[in-house]
Amino acid sequence: MRQSPLAALVAAYARRDPPATVMIVGNAPLAPDPARAALVDAADLVVRMTTFAVDAPGGPPALGRRTDVVVLHRGIVAGPHTFADYTARLYLLVEPGRLHWEPEVIPDWWPTDLGFVPVPNAEFTVPLNGLLGFDPRQPVWSTTGTMAAYLFTELFPTATVRMTGMSIVDRPDQTTFAHAWGESVRVTAEHRLAAEAALLRGWMETGRIEVLS
């Protein structure tokens, strides 16, 4: 495991320390699949992102119901699950825009009694941008899902890291992201999905990550 204060903090929210299995659940809609949902909820650490959805009680199992860590950014529209049971979760704020123009302002939708932990740009955003071939002078960075894949494989390199709900791998040409909760959102100008898809596919081939449909 990476000797990092962030790794130790994240591990404190996992079912075991260090986590042997990490499940990163993206926001893409998923068809019901009891086996997938069970695999999500059985992971040592379950990570979700931004405006996410979970399975409704008594509803068809697809996404699972556990959430240990939430990775989000300042531009989201908070959904009903984003801050549900927030005192039992860890919130990681990715701030790639701080390298360029984004101000250090706590969003007005943030609960007043909830802190957050910034994901260090120098330690994670900059190296990931380099792997993606991005010009550091340009305001270009990865989506939150790809950042989560990089972050948790760096923090826990011996863990089995699985991802689901990630549409980028199969649809790098999309111009909008469909969400399991809420309306679709457009792919904003700072993202280069083809580069992300190529990197994720490379990680799949080397076994760094597993991607579930």
Image: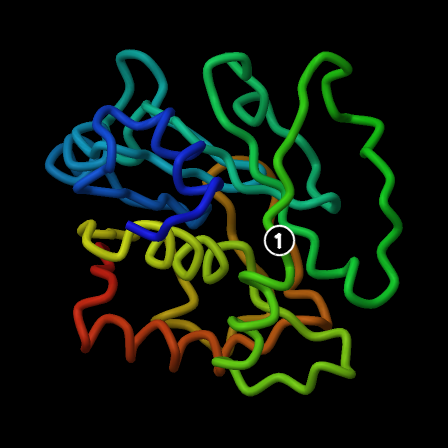
Q: Is residue 8 left or right of 139 when viewed as pictured? A: left
Horizontal and vertical percent position of residue 1: 28, 50
Q: Is residue 17 left or right of 176 when viewed as pictured? A: left
Element type where label 1 sits in the image: loop
Nearer to me, 144 or 6: 6
In the image, residue 26 sits, relative to residue 169, either above or below, namely above
Q: Is residue 114 left or right of 176 when viewed as pictured? A: right
Residue type, numbered disc 1: Pro
Snapshot colouring: rainbow
Total count of labels: 1
In the image, residue 29 sits, relative to residue 37, either above or below, namely below
Horizontal and vertical percent position of residue 127: 53, 73
Horizontal and vertical percent position of residue 204: 23, 71
Mark 1 highlights which residue? 120
Residue furthest to the front in view is 3
Horizontal and vertical percent position of residue 146: 46, 62
- Residue at screen point 19% across, 77% down: 205
In the image, residue 14 sits, relative to residue 130, either above or below, namely above
- Residue at screen point 18% across, 51% down: 160
In the image, residue 12 sits, relative to residue 148, either above or below, namely above
In the picture, residue 30 is in which quadrant? top left
Q: Is residue 157 left or right of 12 when viewed as pictured? A: left
Which quarter of the rendered picture does the C terminus lie within? bottom left
- Residue at screen point 72% across, 12% down: 113
- Residue at screen point 82% across, 34% down: 106
